[in-house]
Amino acid sequence: MDQLYFAAEVMVNGLMTGVMYALVALGFVLIFKASGVFNFAQGVMALFAAMTLVGIQQGQIPFAHLINAVFGTHLHNFGWTVPSLLAILLTACVMVLLAFLIEKLVLQHLVGQEPIILFMATIGLAYFLEGFGDVMWGAEIKALDVGLPQGISDTVDELTLNWLGYGFFIDRLDIWATVIAALLVTALVLFAQYTKQGRAMRAVADDHQAALSVGISLRFIWVMVWSIAGFVALVAGIMWGTKSGVQFSLSLIALKALPVLMLGGFTSIPGAIVGGLIIGVGEKLFEFFAGPLIGGATETWFAYVLALIFLVFRPQGLFGERIIERV
Amino acid sequence: MIYREAGDFKTGYRADGQTFPIRLDRWGYYAALAVAFGIIPFVINNYWANAVLVPFLIYAIAALGLNILTGYAGQVSLGTGGFMAVGAYAVYKLMTSFPEVSILIHILLAGGITAAVGVLFGLPSLRIKGFYLAVATLAAQFFLVWLFNKVPWFYNYSASGQINAPTRTVMDIAVTGPTASAPAKYLVCLVFAFALAWLARNLTRGSLGRKWMAIRDMDIAAEIIGVDPLRAKLSAFAVSSFFIGIAGALLFAVYLGAAEVGEAFGINKSFLVLFMIIIGGLGSIFGSFAGAAFLVVLPVLLKNVFVGGMGWPTDLAAHIELMIVGLLIMVFLIVEPHGLARLWSLAKEKLRLWPFPH
């Protein structure tokens, strides 16, 4: 019986991890739907957002390392700290600026190129942003704290202990992440369905040329979508950063979001959520049952292999649009 | 006249179809070969071999392999690092299990084993394409690295989990292990790079290469005109993995000497080789060499400028290097999606008309 409860606990924790994957995957889907760009840099954007947030919060001087190296100074901090909420707002502004620059300097020049060229361009963007973030804020591992509750939730532990006779250990941060992710998804769906800009965004996603011909500005929509993706990256960055510190491995989570997308389909927001949950639960359960038999640490590849096997049978993913090809 | 086809009379189809139709190009090619085989081995020192020439030749082989798959057959792969690891571990197991067999044969066999693994992971390409496939190849990357980390048989149960290349000789000269000299390492890599480049060039202009390119340009249309996508795609995976496996074997046995799989063959290696073919030129033999040279020399150069010249800390220089590489990728994709190879052929076009362009 205990074994069963333990498996259930692993599963619940997997669900929570899945929510985090879904958060990153969401950013991918948004950009992919609106601009057909498969944005490999999404994970690095989350890392960059988290770094910027910590930097602003703690009053770090941007490029301090570079300035010190060039001018031989010893700058480090402005000597003030910024309240969390203000810092988040400022970081959101930075992400919007970033979206604008990406559109202006990169995407605009790549309109009409093949998707795979755009994909490779975003790999370049990922490298650039990673180096840029490190030069701007320093590469050391930083702790991120914006006041989200952390630690094992006593309430859940007690409740389940009373009901089932077995206390579930669930991180409070994971619960909050789930709530925030749910709110974010609801807000995005409402935005896409009921606002003028949201409708324009869906129109662009459907057909670029038709959208242009009814007077929708493609460039505005793209900047907007990349800004939203930047904001989603910020939220994901806050969650992951609080959980495991702001460090390079954060950007590898983006890679985990890829199999999530392949399961869910590149074009579907619910797909991203469901895919994230399946991957999260799947890899935790697989590690729990099969990990000890074959050496453990299966989480590094399970998601990819699952997606690979899945794709062979259903190439468009669970909720993706059917792929129809003509000569 | 200089650099003209005019006056260079071809008397048969073979001469007409040759790789370098212009006499000056041909001479340049022979001169480059003469320098590479005849002069460099005598003047090479350890620094040049280890920092520039040996990694350049090895990565050129890997880039050739990836270029066959991505540039010619149009199947994007992010699993290069994993396939290089297969080559490295295959050659390690062969070297330690059959010490009496020549290392050159081991390296070729390692390529063959990698080709088999490549075909296995290439199977999904029959169903999926584009970046779906790119992500699917990530499965190969992560799974293979995990496998070599977790199964002790692959690293002969060594306590550190590392693999170390023992000393092996070719004609009584050590080419692997700590006693190998710089000219020996260089020559082994050069022979492989030369032979494989020749092979790649002739495969890609033959019927197999045309099938690959037809699949790349539009697979459904290719299928309709009679190209079997199963054989074309899987042969591309096999040939590409063969090259990459040899590159991995050379990287481990000749260049590194000791390797830890996650560090030496991680996802970053996959990206590095992908960047080489983007910068060098997709679908070009020359581009594979140019891209490899560029990305091998660039970090050395930047390190010399920033750390040696300006006295910056190494970590800052490393971050700036990341920025520059990322920036270059984007600039190349925007300005010249066909890479250095295209710039080179444009220059040749211009040279053909010079000095009277009209």
Image (cartoon, coloured by chain):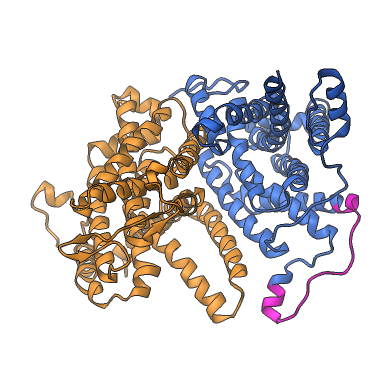
Chain colours: A blue, B orange
Q: Tell which residue pokes out farthest to the left in this image.
A: B11
Q: Residue A322: within the magenta?
A: no
Q: Which residues are magenta?
A: A66-87
Query: What residue is drawn where x is 55% and y is 54%?
Result: B330
Query: Viewed as shown, does residue A300 lie left or right of A148?
Result: left
Query: Which of the pair A141/A13 is nearer the observer?
Result: A13
Q: Give whichever of A294, A285 is nearer the camera.
A: A294
Residue B347 visible? The answer is: no
Quarter of the view holding residue A277: top right
Instruction: Locate the N terminus of chain A and report the quarter of the image it occupies.
Output: top right
| B26 relative to A240 in the view: left or right | left
* Residue A207: x %, y % from top left: 64, 29
Q: Residue A105's x, y, as percent?
A: 64, 54
**Taking B323 as reference, is B50 left or right?**
left
- Residue B232 locus on image (x, y percent): 31, 31
Q: What is the tally of numbered marks visible in this picture? A: 0
Q: Compared to B54, does A30 lie above or below?
A: above
Q: Is residue A75 magenta?
A: yes
Q: Position of residue B246 (x, y in %)?
A: 30, 50
Query: Toward the viewer: A24 or A191?
Result: A24
Q: Residue at x 72, y 68 (%)?
A: A63
Q: Decide if residue A126 is in sight here.
A: yes
| In the image, residue A190 above or below residue A75 | above
Q: Quadrant of the C terminus of chain A?
A: top left
Which residue does the image show at 67% across and 77% down from the upper left? A69
